[in-house]
Amino acid sequence: MRSLNRRAFLGTTAGLSAALLAGCGAGPATGTAAAGRPRGGGRLRVAFAGGGAQETLDPHLSNLFVEASRSKALFDKLADYGPDLSVQPRLAERWESDAALTTWRVTLRQAAFHDGRPVRAADVLYSYARIGDPARAFRARTTLAVIDLARSRAVDDRTVEFALRQPFAEFPNVLAAFGVFIVPEGAEDFTRPVGSGPFVFGSFEPGRSLLLRRNADYWEGAPHVDELQYLIANEESARVNALLGGQVDYAHDITATTARAYRGNDRLAVTRLTNSGMQAFAMKLDRPPFDDRDLREAMFLLADREQLVDTVLGGAGQPGNDLFGRGYQYYAEEIPQRARDLDRAEWLVRKAGAKGLRIRLDTSAAAGGFVESASVFADQMRQAGLDVRVAVGDKDTYWKDVLDRGSLCCFRSGAMPIESHFSQRLLSTSTTNITKWKRPEFDALYTRAVSLADEKARREVYAEMQRMQHAEGGYLVWGFADWLVATAPGVGGVVDAPANTLDWARFDKVWLA
Amino acid sequence: MLGAGAAEPVSLPKYAVRRLLLGLAQIVAVATLVFALTEALPGDAAVVLAGDVPDPERIERIRQELGLDRPAPVRYADWLLGLLRGDLGSSLTAGRPVAGFLAEAGGPTVQLAAITLLLLVPLAVAVGVVAAIREGRLLDRALTSAGIGLYSVPEFALAVVLVALFGIRLGWFPPTAVGVGPNLLAQPAVLVLPLLVLLARPICSISRLVRAGMIDALRSDYVRHAHRLGLSTRRVRLAHALPNAVAPAVQQLARTTDWLLSGVITVEAVFVVPGLGTALVSAVSARDIPVIQGLALVFAATTVAVNLVADLVAFRLAPRAGGAA
């Protein structure tokens, strides 16, 4: 069973490797800044963690970051998220709804699949029907559930009319959702995928390599590079080594330790993707001890967010304010940042009768920094008079394990619109409601918000919902992690965009000097 | 068995058949055990596939798609029946046949392991013999200290140091096999660092055994007798002392091959070699039981075969020790 410890030990050796190398080569940082103006040509080699021989090119099955990135190289969505998670048109040129917000008309831009066929309304309807197939288990199925496909139709080749089951002002979020890619009508076999994206399929070895060629006819302009190759290296240290050894040009997801070790080194440039990941502890509200509002408030107040950001994220992030979506559209900036107040926390712990109470904190290696954050936070809880036991669980099944079991666990989330966070995690009907926040008044506010066409009015309702969460919710959001990507000198065009948004891991705008 | 060997000598074919049958039973036992253990792991492929969106209804639907809603004994019986027909089944998550997985991932691992063994035997024997001949002198002491030092470095630590030094700082060899593809021989330079890691410890342990065996043999009566008969020193050492000296080393070599399987997992992870070790790690993570089972069969069969051959060779080299395994 040594294999199960692999991640752990390689995690520690990454630091050793970095330390051994620190100091070799000095000089000003180059990379993206020095790569100058865009140039054409060359093969861009990018390294990601992968999913072994189980990987797939079916864009509707994409789950891993490498799969999401490959999907966006080969396919397009109707819309995608900008850096603040607002929706940007992609294959859809524009959209408009009726006054009731139940019928949406989407006009497609002129675009073509790699085999020359135009992208038509029928392809859109086919793709959505495939994802929504009740007999299958595509990740985005529930996202599309708001669409009544039986009543939706192709008005003409470039116009789709979507009929919704209820008024939904945030329908563009659906068009941009994770995995909602447009495939040609009838596509079911993705061994040689045909999409409309900036790159054309070349060859694929699951778990090893995907080679793509430039799509010269891409509707948004052809990519700078001639070829794009995805290579798999599961360990962060291996991705960094491959980059330093000149075997790849871009390494996705590196640690803050590595970034620090190579600061000022001209062999490697680091781009920070700010606000990429929310870091939190999730308290369950439907059971003791966190059904007690005083104890939740004590938790909010005992947390030393700066310490967590410094130690767990290596300083690569910002403290959180118990709210999802810092820097995103509709985020309630006006709610004051919570500060540590240990005295009051202790007082609240006593008031809740929880002094010396044994609490289990569930964690696992399911996400980077989880185990570290649990151990740091357990110490902070102890300082307020709580007795904590950190339980390290199985990383592969962690998300399912903590959804219903236990009362306190580590949690993280990638970027998504604040509305999606509400609907997926905070409504009475949400299927992944880990904090068990079930408030009819909150549900009602959500229904009201999404039936308001006016953005400003919607913003006010969202702010109200965030105030409720901030005051007595179950998410103790302690930080927002920057994700770090490393590039070789001479790679240009890598931009700061949160993970899961349009410009993240997007390579048609990247060039090799 | 040990005592019986002296009273009633076992013939080589009889011994081979007995060991072969035992080996087959061991392989089936391993496959069954691995199935049971994988079943006992928390969660299944559906839970892993659902990932951070563990919507219970969706997990149930994935389970139905993958056929995981059938009881475990039924799935095991299915797999066993398939095995009798020579069918290893299909990956739960990728849907492709397991045999294909094994063939793809087997290439790089077999290359690594085979080259390791090819280099290991002559190198370890040479080091052991030289040390034995120079027993107690400077060269012997130097080889011994270097060997013990190297033996106490874990593979992953050695790998990290070698990569940092020769792969990155000096840039002599590629630090990883990223982008090389399944045939590592296409770019032999990528093999250098992984082979150094895989060779380091077994060279130490086997050369120590050869050295000890050789020293014993050189002091034995028959070697002294051979010298008295006027045979050349070279002939005495290589034709008479060496065969007796390497018998224990052959069995150590077999154990080394078992060890190679786990060493390869480490080396594959550090150097990003897409072989059987990498396949096993991702299959266990994905709870992809048919793939895990297929890999377990390969590992078990290799171990059994290598030990069988080693025992037979040892039996030939020194019949008295043969039955001991």
Image: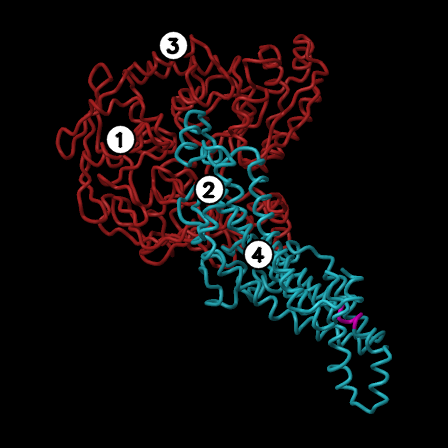
Identify by letter the chain in red. Answer: A
Q: Quadrant of residue A512?
A: bottom left
Q: Which mark is residue A444?
A: 3
Q: Is residue A250 visible?
A: no
Dots 3 and 1: beta carbons under 8 Å?
no
Dot placed on the residue nearer the N-terminal end, 4 or 2: 2
Q: Which mark is residue A129?
A: 1
Q: Quadrant of the N terminus of chain A?
A: top right
Q: Which mark is residue A427?
A: none
Q: Residue at x 55, y 56 (%)?
A: B271
According to the image, label 4 marks what residue? B301
Magenta span of residues:
B209-213
* Chain B colour in the picture: cyan
Q: Residue at x 56, y 24 (%)?
A: A281
Placement of A94 over or under A209, stated as above or below: above
Q: Mark 4 is on which residue type?
A: Ala
Q: Mark 1 is on which residue type?
A: Ala
According to the image, label 2 marks what residue? B78
Q: Mark 2 is on which residue type?
A: Asp
Dots 2 and 1: beta carbons under 8 Å?
no
Q: Mark 3 is on which residue type?
A: Ala
Q: Main secondary structure of the magenta part?
A: helix
Badge nearest the viewer, 3 or 1: 1
Residue A234 spot, x, y in % from top left: 51, 48
Q: Is A122 left or right of B170, judged from the image as shown?
A: left
Between the residue at mark 2 and the residue at mark 1, the CA separation in whole angstroms equals 34 Å
Badge nearest the viewer, 4 or 1: 4
Q: Nearer the viewer, residue A344 or A136?
A: A136
